[in-house]
Image: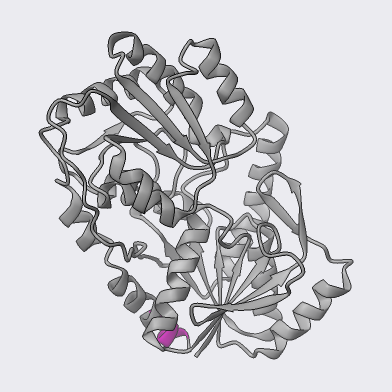
Amino acid sequence: MKVLQFLPYFPPHIGGVEAFAKERSSAFSEQKKGKLINVVFSLGQPENLTSYQQDGYTVMILPAFELISNFPVPKIRSPIFWSQIQKIKAEKADIIQTHTRFFLSTFLGGLLAKLRKIKRIHIEHGSGFVKGLSCRKTAFARCYDQIFGRLIFRLADSLVAISHGNLPFIQQFTNKKISVIYRGFNLSPVLREKKEKPDQILIGFVGRLVKLKGVDLLIEAFAQLQQENRHLRLQIIGDGEERFALEKQAEALGVGDKISFLGYQSSEKVYSDFLPHIDIFVNPSLQEGLPTTVIEALFAQCITVATDVGGTREIADREDFIVVEPGSVKALKHGLNQALALIGKVYGASYEQVRERFNWKRGVEEYLEIYKKLC
């Protein structure tokens, strides 16, 4: 069995879709069920390479540029682009797999599937229309969804949502059957020191620094809490177009010396070196499908506060997982106060639950079943 997986980005570029795709690629290779080829745009990829092998799978790179932030566009005038397309066609895939309806990689994969009469499975990571953009960009994104997004869903031979929270959004576009398959994680247990009465409490965030992630709300809530709890510190891992504005916000609120902006870190380093030292992990996002960083934080036995978006509530229901209203500084502050009260009392309550729910082998088997049905 040969699977072509079309993606807008791929590691080392950071993001939930990228991490999902890399884990699926490694797992597919490890199961020895066939060949998986990732077709990715060039942003974040090694320069001067058109393809490479890694962990038993192949990555083929299409030249691209970003028309707007986080929206790669293929360089269709480039001879390399068309040379790569010919190589992709020559692979004679059994299955084409696409991710998230609004990326041009999905449109490209869908077009190839239609022209070559190849079965296509589409995995939707989104749970709503795009938010956090300018009025013009938001209007364009909604219009794009209504036309091309609808087409992507309707022409797919099989549809998968990454959480039950995604279903209502997808069902606006199609009446087709939609499978729900949780992402699998292959993470080792984390050893963490249990704190009784810590001198300093670390709050952490990991993700892109863009409007949609709600980091400005976290900084505001942290600044208010800092007035009452001087021993709090906030560490922010990630980069993005909002970083400078967020740093200025922290300074303006008088907490610039209490907040560390640590920039981009690999997911491996985040899990092994960052999360084990975090007391409270926060995901203040305004929109998610199924937040990867929240699951990783619970694997790392962090007390976790997350906004009620997408499939977040499906992750766990133990006392170390606090779900709050999105878009509200007041709700974030309240959730953080609840988390502070748990320090020294609760660690790892959700660990067994997330390990069972997001078992990586089971996820691989569920996708293989779909592949078999399509072939």
Q: Residue at horizontal 69%, vertical 57%?
A: 43
Residue 18 seen anywhere in this rendered image of the structure: yes
Most foreground residue, 120 or 338: 338
Q: Residue at horizontal 23%, vertical 55%?
A: 354
Q: Where residue 66 sits in the image (x, y, percent)?
A: 75, 50
Instruction: Give left or right: position of 100 versus 134.
Output: left
Q: Residue at horizontal 49%, vertical 67%?
A: 22
Q: Where residue 45 sits in the image (x, y, percent)?
A: 66, 63
Q: Quadrant of residue 138?
A: top right
Q: Where residue 342 sits in the image (x, y, percent)?
A: 15, 30
Q: Give the magenta range.
A: 370-374
- The image shows a total of numbered marks equal to 0
| Main SS class of the magenta portion in the image | helix
- Above or below — where is 21 with respect to 58? above
Confirm whether the magenta stretch covers residue 87.
no
Most foreground residue, 63 or 266: 266
Q: Where residue 358 sits in the image (x, y, percent)?
A: 28, 61
Instruction: Give left or right: position of 16 versus 366.
Output: right
